């Protein structure tokens, strides 16, 4: 699946949106296996690690003096409020089915909120997400507007890291034909459905491009106010940002120095990573993932038997007691037998009618 990204060289674009003439060898991580199942699992588990504990009050629903009346009074054995002289006395209490009672299985703050994920799985998922971001088909399937973008993955010069003004960043995005993706984000901004709109999460919107840099020399200030833009340092790549929602194909914009560091971060199949201890890129399970091409290959066709010709069609079995044609095949005299029985029945009906007429 990732073999489509095996382009040997990647062009570098200037601040004017034109190819600078510099090219970079494609990092090996862009040819890593694409595993959407692993990315979805790791995203789900890692995403739980920033949850905050919540629970109901420990004594909620049990701040009353209540006791069951026991058996023999033709009422349920639920605890009931003591006393008299008020509507509240005699009412059920404590139970989750009672008005003013506690919830079933009250939530506790000591729930297991966080999840530990194997480091190799996390690295594998990140390699898959980066490889998927280099495939134009997956980036477009994710919903990004990249029809006019000159190249994917998109790499810009390191001078972009020194931008400090949003005006400069907007100009760069327009010259790189990335502004359509920002307009898509602006149009998608809507009011959140649910309680979150009362909790400082009033609006929701789609994701736009993700800018990955090596050194922050002002780039974060330039891009941070543009809707949908995410900024990440190449030292702190985060699967929650590279594959939001656990879905592959985020549109990534790299700076030149950030892209050059990928081989050092993740290594290749022949050379281990220089920044991670003894780590190599994961090996693909299949050398060719094009199933259609495999099925149509001469090797597979040679191992298959020839299709059978002239095979007899199976027919549905009919009940001869309900189907006259089938009965005739079994018993050609069935028509005569049936006709005789009909004539006999008609004769009996006539005789019965004549007998009834004579008796009257």
Image (cartoon, helix red, strand yellow):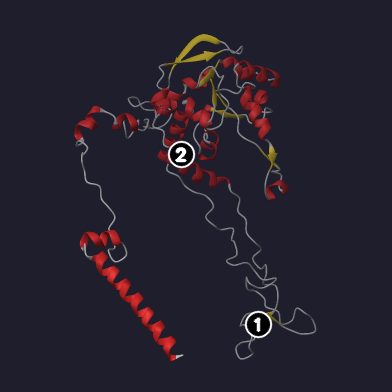
Quadrant of the rendering where the N terminus is positioned:
top left
Q: Is residue 89 left or right of residue 114?
A: right
Mark 1, secondary structure of its residue: strand
Dividing the picture into quadrants, the one containing residue 50 is top right
Residue 105: give x, y in percent of width and height: 57, 66
Report, in whole angstroms, how far the alpha carbon at label 1 lies from the one at label 2.
53 Å
Dividing the picture into quadrants, the one containing residue 56 is bottom right
The residue sitting at 68% across, 36% down in the picture is: 189
Q: Residues within 10 Å of mark 2 (few under 14, many from 20)?
A: many
| 1 and 2 marks in contact (CB < 8 Å) | no
The residue sitting at 57% across, 12% down in the picture is: 14
Q: Is residue 35 visible?
A: yes
Q: Is residue 13 left or right of residue 328?
A: right
Q: Is residue 31 left or right of residue 102?
A: left
Residue 320 is tagged as: none
List the residue tagged with mark 2. 39
35 or 322, nearer to the observer: 322
215 over 325 or under it: above or below: above
Mark 2, secondary structure of its residue: helix
Which residue appears farthest toward the right when viewing the image?
A: 85
Q: Residues within 10 Å of mark 1 (few under 14, many from 20)?
A: some
The residue sitting at 42% across, 89% down in the picture is: 358
List the residue tagged with mark 1. 67
127 over 50 or under it: above or below: above
Q: Is residue 318 visible?
A: no
Q: Earlier in the sequence, mark 1 or mark 2?
A: 2
């Amino acid at each position: 699946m990732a073999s489509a990204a095996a382009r040997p060289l990647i062009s570098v674009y200037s601040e004017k949106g034109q190819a600078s003439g510099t090219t970079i060898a494609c990092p090996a991580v862009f040819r890593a296996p694409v595993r959407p199942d692993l990315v979805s699992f790791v995203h789900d588990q890692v995403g739980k690690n920033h949850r905050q504990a919540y629970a109901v009050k420990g004594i909620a629903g049990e701040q009353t003096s209540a006791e069951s009346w026991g058996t023999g009074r033709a009422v349920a054995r639920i605890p009931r409020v003591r006393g008299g002289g008020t509507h509240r006395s005699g009412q059920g209490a404590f139970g989750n089915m009672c008005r003013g009672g506690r919830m079933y299985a009250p939530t506790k703050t000591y729930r297991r909120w966080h999840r530990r994920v194997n480091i190799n799985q996390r690295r594998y998922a990140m390699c898959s997400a980066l490889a998927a971001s280099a495939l134009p088909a997956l980036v477009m399937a994710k919903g990004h507007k990249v029809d006019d973008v000159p190249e994917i993955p998109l790499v810009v010069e390191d001078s972009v890291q020194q931008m400090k003004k949003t005006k400069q960043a907007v100009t760069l995005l327009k010259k790189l034909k990335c502004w359509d993706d920002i307009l898509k984000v602006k149009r998608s901004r809507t009011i959140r459905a649910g309680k979150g709109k009362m909790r400082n999460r009033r609006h929701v919107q789609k994701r736009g491009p993700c800018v990955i840099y090596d050194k922050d020399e002002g780039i974060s200030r330039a891009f941070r106010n543009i809707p949908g833009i995410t900024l990440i340092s190449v030292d702190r790549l985060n699967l929650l940002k590279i594959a939001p929602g656990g879905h592959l194909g985020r549109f990534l914009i790299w700076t030149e120095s950030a892209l050059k560091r990928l081989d050092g971060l993740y290594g290749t199949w022949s050379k281990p990573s220089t920044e991670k201890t003894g780590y190599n890129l994961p090996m693909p399970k299949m050398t060719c993932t094009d199933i259609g091409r495999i099925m149509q290959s001469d090797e597979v066709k040679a191992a298959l038997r020839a299709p059978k010709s002239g095979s007899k069609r199976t027919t549905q079995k009919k009940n001869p007691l309900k189907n006259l044609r089938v009965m005739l095949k079994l018993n050609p005299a069935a028509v005569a037998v049936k006709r005789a029985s009909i004539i006999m029945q008609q004769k009996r009906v006539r005789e019965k009618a004549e007998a009834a007429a004579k008796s009257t």
